[in-house]
Image (tube, helix red, strand yellow):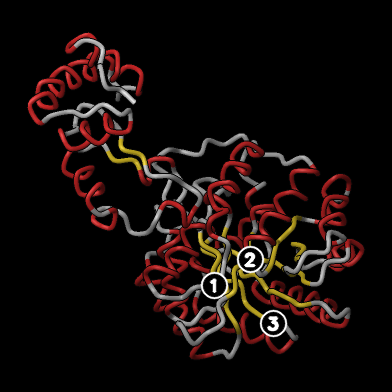
């Protein structure tokens, strides 16, 4: 993996906005695109130009923003869709059609032959217009593999630059993902993008499995935003590549928390405290054993530093805290706490936390100390 050029394709502005109930204002779409570009994203799927109106205007504005990233428009295999993308000024197009029999029969109400004819015609048109082309195989993970190979060969011959392998309903596991991607790579010499959904909580794992099997493009969204349970998360994929596989893409990862907060507010979707990589609990320690270890050496309970993703370490005082955390916290206040005092105070702290059903704030800790021991004389 270290010897390959891996590319991040962010679709927050397309698949992310297709999350039920989410709408980005035009200024938000442009701001998010600028954030993604500054982070280091290689290609931004900016939206669906054929929708027209505000969508088209936002995509035009992104194309004129002078970003380093490639800007892609999403299209059906319809010539007028691609013409709308061209009018926006994008340099790349995604041409998407279903390849699974359940989609072909019930959604498209067509045949496999019709699918191939339409995608080939659309890809050929886009290539004649000088576009970079991703031929998307929607619901690839439920497609007959022989037909999917036929589809891949057809779009390659038509000039497509890559195949987007879509786990549209998130039914893959990493083992099957590797088998499928290895077979496509073996049978067709065509670049592959992983586009994975999180319905069973395996979007990032499946994306990484696809990369191990030979895919060089990874579709992501900020905080895993996306339809139903979402997509593979940008921050999870980038940090996993860096720390688990030793592949540093050169991203400004220290911006991850800031970007996550912005997208969360713009989308009206919660940024959970327990969110992997960027959640506020990532570097919050309460349990006595964990906090003691983190105070002695953060590496004992942290896989990477909080500063690397724009967060800070927190030692919280709660029901599960120990004396080491308590002494460290009071040292911050300039109040030395003996082992004996720490042990006595800890019992009071735990009782209060159970009563309040939460950790204690700093002032509450000081008040508790004053109630039990009186006002400290040597507080800094």
Q: Residue at x 67, y 46 (%)?
A: 17
The tag earlier along the polypeptide, 1 or 2, is 2
Residue shown at the point (21%, 38%) measured from the top left: 287
| Residue matched to label 2 | 40
Considering every residue shown, the one lying at the far right of the view is 87
**Relative to residue 180, is residue 38 drawn left or right?**
right
Q: Dot 1 corresponds to which residue?
A: 249
Which one is closest to the eye, mark 3 or mark 2? 2
Q: Which residue is mark 3?
A: 161
Residue density around tag 2, few if under 14, some if 14–19, many if 20 or more, within 10 Å: some
Nearest the eye: 325 or 220: 325
Q: Secondary structure at mark 3?
A: loop
Q: Horizontal placement of 141 versus 83: left or right?
A: left
Are the residues tagged 1 and 2 within 8 Å (C-beta)? yes
Q: Position of residue 91 (x, y in %)?
A: 81, 72
**Residue 244 in which image quadrant:** bottom left
Left or right, 311 with respect to 319, comes to right
Spatial separation of the CA atoms under disc 1 and disc 2:
8 Å
Spatial distance from mark 3 to mark 2, Cα to Cα? 21 Å
Q: Nearer the viewer, residue 32 or 93?
A: 32
Rendered residue at 39%/56% (across/down): 305
| Corner quadrant of residue 147 | bottom right
Q: Quadrant of the N terminus?
A: bottom left
């Amino acid at each position: 993996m270290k010897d390959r050029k891996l590319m991040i394709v962010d679709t927050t502005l397309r698949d992310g906005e297709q999350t039920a109930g989410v709408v980005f204002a035009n200024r938000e779409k442009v701001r998010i695109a600028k954030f993604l570009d500054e982070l280091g994203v290689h290609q931004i799927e900016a939206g669906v130009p054929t929708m027209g109106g505000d969508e088209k205007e936002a995509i035009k504005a992104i194309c004129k923003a002078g970003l380093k990233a490639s800007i892609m428009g999403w299209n059906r295999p319809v010539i007028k869709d691609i013409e709308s993308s061209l009018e926006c000024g994008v340099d790349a197009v995604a041409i998407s059609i279903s390849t699974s029999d359940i989609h072909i029969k019930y959604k498209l109400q067509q045949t496999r032959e019709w699918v191939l004819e339409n995608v080939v015609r659309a890809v050929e048109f886009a290539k004649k217009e000088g576009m970079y082309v991703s031929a998307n195989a929607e619901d690839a993970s439920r497609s007959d593999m022989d037909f999917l190979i036929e589809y891949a060969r057809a779009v390659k011959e038509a000039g497509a630059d890559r195949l987007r392998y879509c786990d549209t309903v998130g039914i893959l596991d990493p083992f099957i993902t590797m088998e499928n991607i290895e077979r496509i790579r073996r049978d067709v010499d065509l670049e592959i993008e992983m586009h994975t959904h999180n319905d069973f909580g395996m979007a990032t794992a499946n994306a990484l499995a696809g990369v191990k099997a030979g895919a060089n493009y990874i579709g992501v969204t900020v905080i895993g935003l996306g339809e139903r349970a979402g997509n593979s998360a940008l921050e999870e994929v980038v940090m996993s590549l860096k720390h688990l596989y030793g592949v540093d893409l050169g991203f400004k990862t220290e911006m991850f928390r800031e970007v996550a907060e912005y997208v969360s507010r713009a989308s009206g979707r919660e940024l959970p405290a327990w969110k992997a990589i960027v959640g506020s609990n990532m570097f919050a320690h309460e349990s006595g054993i964990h906090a003691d270890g983190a105070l002695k050496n953060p590496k004992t309970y942290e896989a990477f530093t909080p500063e690397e993703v724009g967060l800070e370490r927190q030692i919280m005082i709660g029901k599960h805290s120990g004396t080491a955390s308590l002494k460290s916290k009071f040292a911050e206040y300039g109040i030395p706490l003996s082992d004996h005092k720490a042990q006595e105070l800890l019992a009071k702290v735990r009782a209060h936390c159970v009563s309040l059903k939460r950790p204690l704030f700093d002032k509450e800790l000081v008040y508790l100390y004053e109630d039990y021991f009186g006002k400290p004389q040597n507080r800094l």
